[in-house]
Amino acid sequence: MKFYSIPAGPFEVNTYIAFNDLGGRKEGFLIDPGGREKKIEKIIKDEGIVLKFILNTHCHIDHVAMDNYFKEKFGIKIMANKEEEYILKNLKEQAEYLGFIYTGDVVIDEYLRENEAIAVEGVNILPIFTPGHSPGSTSFLVNDKYLFSGDTLFKNTIGRTDISGGSQELIISSIKNKLLKLADGIKVLPGHGEPTTIGEERKYNPYLI
Ligand SMILES: [Zn+2]
């Protein structure tokens, strides 16, 4: 798998463009499209990627702001955890309050199922439900090498839990019982900020020691 990480939108969400690297036709997907849509489109075009779907780690506005834009542009489906639907009910208010462009209601076209793999050619994506930052927060383990951790696990910190539906107890148990079970060498690609590894977070993350 190859990927681009584009900090996008007012909260600089890491929007990822991930795609297979098999030398032929490139198939790929977006994770958390939050803005910078023209730049992202240019990369997709220049690389010749055929987009298959959008994955959302959760549905706070900064992570879904451009879902509808890409859904319409490329005719692709939006996938997220069903538990996030309640957040989508007040998306317009979130957008207005936080300064995002509102592109209409976001509808989840297909619900993620935990541990049920989603695939594009050469890329195996395993959704791991990691509630705590929000009830349906999901991390994606890709090819047993990369973990897209959304707003659950960050470099040296964890996601905030003071937004409605958040739970500090749950986020810590999600990370300890699910993410820290993964191998040290797995690269963690979070929803904001710098990448890290499972091993580094196991050793140095003050919330997990
Ligand atoms: Zn969030």
Image: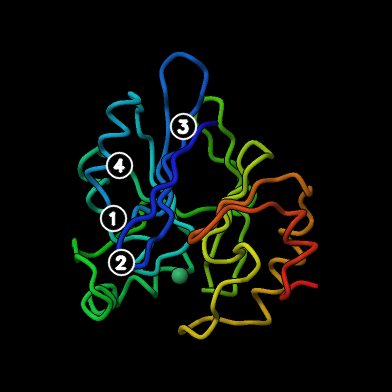
Q: Is mark 4 within 8 Å of ligand 1?
A: no
- Amino acid marked by disc 2: Pro
Q: Crowding near pointer 2: few (<14 within 10 Å), some, many (20+)?
A: few
Which label sits on residue 131? none
Mark 3 or 4 closer to N-term?
A: 3
Whole-percent x, y for residue 94 in the image: 29, 77
For the residues labelled 3 and 1, the Cα–Cα distance comes to 19 Å
* Corner quadrant of residue 63: bottom left
Mark 3 — residue? 19
Q: Quick check: 172 left or right of 58?
A: right
Q: Residue furthest top?
A: 24
Q: Quick check: 165 left or right of 86?
A: right
Task: Identify the residue at image location x=52%, y=67%.
Answer: 136
Mark 4 — residue? 40
Q: Quick check: 102 left or right of 25?
A: left
For the residues labelled 4 and 1, the Cα–Cα distance comes to 9 Å
- As displayed, is residue 128 above or below residue 58? above
Q: Are marks 2 and 1 in contact (CB under 8 Å)?
A: yes
Mark 1 — residue? 35
